[in-house]
Amino acid sequence: MKEIKLGSRSIGPGHPPFIIAEMSGNHNQSLERALEIVDEAAKSGAHALKIQTYKADTMTLDMDHGEFKIEDQESLWKGKSLYKLYQEAYTPWEWHEPIFERARKWGMIPFSTPFDETAVDFLETLDVPMYKIASFENNHIPLIKKVAATGKPLIISTGMATVEELTDAVHAARSAGCKDLVLLKCTSTYPASPENTNIMTIPHMRDLFQCQVGLSDHTMGIGVAVASIALGATVIEKHFTLRRADGGVDSAFSMEPLEMKALVEESERAWLSLGKVSYGPTKSEQKSTIFRRSIYITKNVKSGDILTPENIKVIRPGNGLAPKYYEEVLGKKVIKDIQAGTPLNWEMLER
């Protein structure tokens, strides 16, 4: 897969997983808290900091009934109108620049998810290096084309999308100028359960659309994300907060700093472990081969004696004949005196 260059950092199978900390609405309408989230994400080792760019008026209508109200009793946001939810969660546009500047000072890559065309125009004035299309917008073909036309790397979350819908999204992105595309497997439930995450889709999606793939993960913990690395994920996105106990629209399924630190470390370990198809001792294992088993003389024998289970054994270390020759050497005659504790070799035996 083609590498994606973002300044001094590269994204691709030949590089450690690219970890994105998603702030979303966890700033709880405090710029001070938002900047603290940036600081803690950086200290945790996250490579990128992502926010969301929209206004309630560009997302929905200010209505509090029918389909404009969340009635699902299992939803984290039950009882709220869509408009009020987006008012609570949105990141004020005047905060974008200080948030991005703080991230850059830490060496992180700051970017955003725009939810309409005006958000793209605004983000272009801030010179964001890449974009993300949210799962709920992956059928918004005009928006995808608008973002793709910037020529910048594009990440698309795939939650809820059928293969046909993803094909439309990928075609729209590429036809509008996107050359660097990443698709993130995503389950759009909050939180998501591991058994409903289906990360086996990741390699299938990579082969189907011939692009880099990853995971936008709403499960708790790091197990699912780390497992996705073994399936070819090059990008992992997780919602991030200072403390879940502080509350906030997305806090219930967001990672805390120590969890993010563990994700960064363990996902890189998973990536390092992939290596290549390899059999036989590695270079670092060579010195351990001495501790394998082999055939040894276990009682003193004289020239002309016959080897029996009473005077040879398969034991450690590994300086003698391989254990596979044990039955072959039983009954053979030795041609010289041999002391107990001597590794057996063919030169000791009558031919």
Image (cartoon, rainbow, N blue to C red):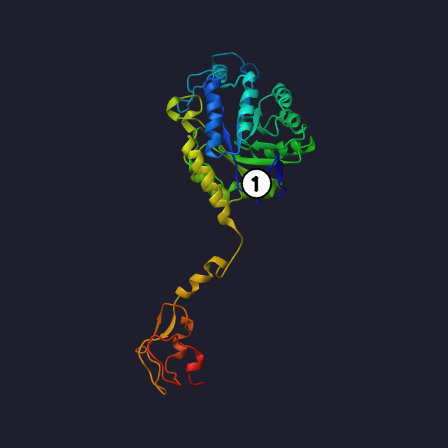
Q: Is residue 25 visible?
A: no
Q: Quadrant of residue 308?
A: bottom left
Q: Is residue 49 above or below residue 57?
A: below
* Total number of numbered discs in the rendering: 1
Q: Residue at x 41, y 35 (%)?
A: 221
Q: Residue 293 location in percent, x, y? A: 38, 68
Residue carrying label 1 = 205
Q: Position of residue 245 (x, y in %)?
A: 37, 24
Residue at left offset 65%, top offset 24%: 142
Crowding around mark 1 (Cα neighbors within 10 Å: few <14, some 14 to 19, many 20+) is many
Q: From this viewpoint, is residue 86 visible? A: yes
Occupied quadrant, residue 291: bottom left
Looking at this view, is 199 or 312 the one in front? 312
Q: Which residue is at the far front? A: 105
The amino acid type found where label 1 is placed reads Met
Quadrant where the C terminus sits is bottom left
The N terminus lies in quadrant: top right
The extreme bottom residue here reads 304
Determine whether, in the image, residue 6 is placed left or right of residue 274.
right
In the structure shown, which secondary structural element does the residue marked by tag 1 occupy? helix
Q: Which x, y percent locates residue 9?
A: 59, 37
Q: Quadrant of residue 168?
A: top right
Give the x, y percent position of residue 198: 48, 39
- The answer to which of 109 and 212 lies nearer the viewer is 109
